[in-house]
DNA sequence: CGCCTTGTTGCAAATGAATTGCAAACTGTG
DNA sequence: CACAGTTTGCAATTCATTTGCAACAAGGCG
């Protein structure tokens, strides 16, 4: 029940971020905001808890197993969870949204390094560019500046075997 | 015929990048690669030449005027031009691709600052993170690392009037 | 200038992610 | 247990983008 991420190949030497809030803490967040604790919802959160890499709606749906629910329900729930700040949406530019569970209080801002061939995902931590954003704010008068940044490249395995 | 960008609001104080290769130079590139110089193609290149901000397929199609062609043709041409390295595709995360014309030899790598309310686009020049990429390469063994980065914020006009 | 090969176009249909209308089922609460 | 407000399943819809196919046009060549 607590198997590691089977959906995504990723370098074993680097563990993913190890947040994994316990399920009861998650349902607590739901309860607090008058969201109902349904079977699909719990199952989805369980899936997200198990996989600390970004997952697509379809992948989450596929990983549900028993408590199967409609794919539309997965979409709806991830939107809800995003609005509640419980998951973060990522965009790897392939037209399919991906989600990661957040620890409470964490805004989840971080980046990834994605293999353009096998889709291996490496969690990149550390975010620079606060100076860049400050400069942009100063130069162009923009406020509330954020950014979306992902890295792409060829993973060692793919570089070798191809 | 050489009106400025009418499709996108953008701060007047900052001109966009002023590449604008002449049309004949562009058709020359086509000829060199056994691509035919058709009316739709020339018209599309003209539109791109006039607007040095990222344009969507639909926007390009709408800006064609006389030499109207099918929207599918616009899509096909932008894919072709991208493969040929004559335009660069950008992704602002709204599910719609945008394109900018490139000067020959330029790979067009750069970033934007986009207003989340009115979609004003500011061209950001300067690309840091070569060190970050080098670090990622070293740490994870990836090669050919690039990145996709866009900034988002509230433009001064929107911050004021709302 | 006509012919031929090949790239291109228009049009309509297909794809694929994501959203939505609606009626039925369910959750939390009193 | 009953009620009000959510959530779900299912099917239909939207929207960007792609694609099959037959008609067409561009460029090379004789
Ligand atoms: Mn991540
Ligand atoms: Mn640009
Ligand atoms: Zn790889
Ligand atoms: Zn704005």
Image (cartoon, coloured by chain):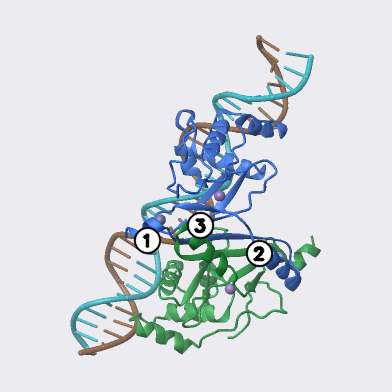
Chain colours: A green, B blue, C brown, D cyan
- Coordinates of residue B29 in the picture (x, y in percent): 68, 34
Circle 1 residues within 10 Å: few <14, some 14–19, many ≥20: some
Which residue carries the number 2 mark? B129
The answer to whether the residue labelled 1 contacts the one labelled 2, judged by CB atoms less than 8 Å apart, is no
Judging from the image, what secondary structure is the residue with disc 3 in?
strand
Q: Is residue B115 found left or right of C1 in the rendered image?
A: left
Q: Is residue B20 found left or right of A139 in the rendered image?
A: right
Q: Chain of mark 2?
A: B
Q: Nearer the viewer, residue B95 or A70?
A: B95
Task: State ligand 4's quadrant.
Answer: bottom left
Label number found at residue B113? 3
Circle 3 residues within 10 Å: few <14, some 14–19, many ≥20: many
- Coordinates of residue A91 in the picture (x, y in percent): 54, 63
Label number found at residue B159? 1
**Disc on the earlier residue, 3 or 2:** 3
Q: CA distance from mark 1 to mark 3?
A: 15 Å
Q: Residue at x 48, y 87 (%)?
A: A23
Q: Tell me, yes or no, if residue A89 can be seen here.
A: yes
Q: Residue at x 49, y 32 (%)?
A: B2
The quadrant holding residue A84 is bottom left
Query: In the image, are marks 3 and 2 on the same chain?
Result: yes
Q: Nearer the viewer, residue C19 or B27?
A: B27
Q: Residue at x 51, y 41 (%)?
A: B51
- Coordinates of residue B141 in the picture (x, y in percent): 76, 69
Judging from the image, what secondary structure is the residue with disc 1 in?
helix
Vertically, is B10 above or below A13? above
């Amino acid at each position: 029940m607590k198997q590691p991420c089977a959906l995504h190949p990723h370098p074993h030497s680097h563990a993913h971020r190890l947040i994994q809030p316990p399920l009861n803490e998650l349902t607590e967040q739901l309860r607090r905001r008058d969201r109902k604790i349904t079977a699909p919802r719990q199952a989805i959160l369980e899936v997200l808890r198990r996989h600390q890499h970004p997952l697509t709606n379809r992948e989450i749906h596929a990983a549900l197993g028993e408590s199967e629910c409609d794919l539309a329900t997965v979409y709806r729930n991830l939107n809800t969870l995003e609005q509640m700040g419980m998951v973060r949406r990522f965009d790897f530019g392939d037209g399919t949204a991906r989600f990661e569970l957040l620890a409470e209080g964490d805004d989840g801002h971080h980046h990834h390094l994605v293999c353009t061939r096998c889709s291996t995902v490496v969690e990149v931590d550390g975010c620079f560019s606060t100076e860049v954003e400050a400069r942009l704010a100063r130069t162009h008068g923009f406020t509330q500046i954020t950014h979306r940044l992902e890295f792409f490249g060829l993973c060692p395995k793919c570089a070798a075997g191809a």
